[in-house]
Image (cartoon, rainbow, N blue to C red):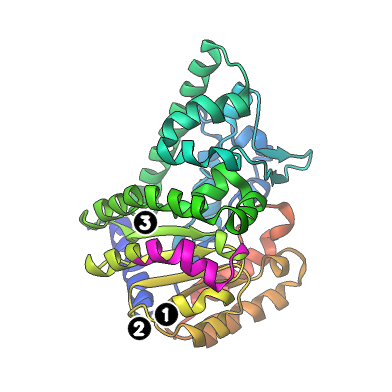
Amino acid sequence: MNEKEKLLKERLKLFDDAMRIEETRRVPCVSNAFTWKIFDSDLHISVLEATTQWDTDIMERIVREHIERYNFDAYLDLGTRDNFSYNQILGRSEHYIDESGNISAKDDPKLFPEEYEAVTENATMFQWCVVAPRVYGSLTFGQIEDAVKALINYTAYYDRMNNIVHREYGVPALAQRLLMHPTDNLISYYRGLKGFSLDMRRNPEKIEAYVEKNSTGFLETAKYYLQMPREQELFGIYTGFLGHNIMNGKQFARFFYPVWKKAMDLCIENEKSMMIYAEGSTVRIREFLQDIPKGYLCIFPETDDLFDLRRACPNACIAGGMSVDMLGISTKQECVDAAKNFVDNMGPGYIFSQNKMMTYRRDGTRENMLAVQEVVLQNRY
């Protein structure tokens, strides 16, 4: 076993012990840095350059810098979240990028309420025949060909970077599979937050039909990946929670919980764990997460008080905590004190990370990030 394989094994044990809520040699840490890596890089590359030139080594160099500078145990992003190459080719993007490199997402619906039956019946045909023309208009064969080539370059980078971090840095993969709940797919790709919020009140039966139709594929995919032998993954499933932020408890129980609970049961059945990246807060849905057996669920919230969440969900591993607002504008000592509070007082079953996806330049300074990492990496229970 070489040094990188040994390091990978040690890191896997750190996370496994944290998942079981057992004492660890030190608190494991995960980087939640996304576009911020580009701003922090010494290459001084623009966001658009870094997220479009996948046939070069630009993003690889940026990610290598981040890994070598901060030495996290795992990474939520390896430079692959934003791919604007084919958007440039096709003439439209779902995001705005300003002169400073700040990214904003649109909330434009691509599906109208009267079209629910069509997307529920055959989502693939609906995407090709309705969504694509609606979003991109008329495209030439040359544009489509160039977009496919750009996507191939992006996929090649994704595969290459995953191999690099395991082989050269001893870094585990996050999960065997990223799976999104049907309601969150509906929000992200079709209706947007506003449209979905209205639909829950005006067309709840259409949402239910869509979820029922798509839950089969969601659960079959989950089962397939959960039954694969574990290699170097931290979790069996990594999923995001978004729609819960605009749901009350009854709506969550109606539209979201039944399918999610079946996926959670599959994790338990296959002795695998699930990580929930909960955008926003979990306060309104904690009652649905409390009874999951110890060792199977990790909750990574953006805005929750982690100590309150620990008391509410004692069986869950808790991740996150470090405020990006502090990392961006507070003093080094204030950041160090905050980090020490988490690593000293959260106890077993805790994974240190930034509370939100580091996307903007103001989400952190290098000085604060380095100071905090020094605290975490030297910590011992």
Q: Is residue 189 left or right of residue 43?
A: left
Percent x, y for residue 239? 44, 58
| Vertical side of 274 occupied by 209: above or below | above
Specify whether residue 10 is painted magenta.
Answer: no
**Extent of the magenta region:** 246-261
CB-based contact (under 8 Å), mark 2 and mark 1: yes
Give the label on residue 22, or none: 2
Closer to viewer: mark 2 or mark 3:
3
- Amino acid, disc 1: Gly
Q: Main secondary structure of the magenta part?
A: helix
- Amino acid, disc 2: Glu
The residue carrying pointer 3 sits among few (fewer than 14), some (14 to 19) or many (20 or more) residues within 10 Å by Cα, namely many
Specify whether residue 256 is painted magenta.
Answer: yes
Percent x, y for residue 348? 42, 84
Q: Which residue is mark 3?
A: 175
Dot 3: element: strand
Q: Which residue is mark 1?
A: 349
Q: Nearer the viewer, residue 81 or 269?
A: 269
Q: Residue at x 41, y 35 (%)?
A: 122
Q: Nearer the viewer, residue 179 or 208?
A: 208
Q: Is residue 93 left or right of residue 122?
A: right
Percent x, y for residue 131? 55, 31
Q: Split into 4 quadrants, where in the image is the C terminus? A: bottom left
Q: Residue at x 67, y 41 (%)?
A: 108
Dot 1: element: loop
Q: Earlier in the sequence, mark 2 or mark 3?
A: 2
Alpha-carbon span between mark 2 and mark 1: 6 Å
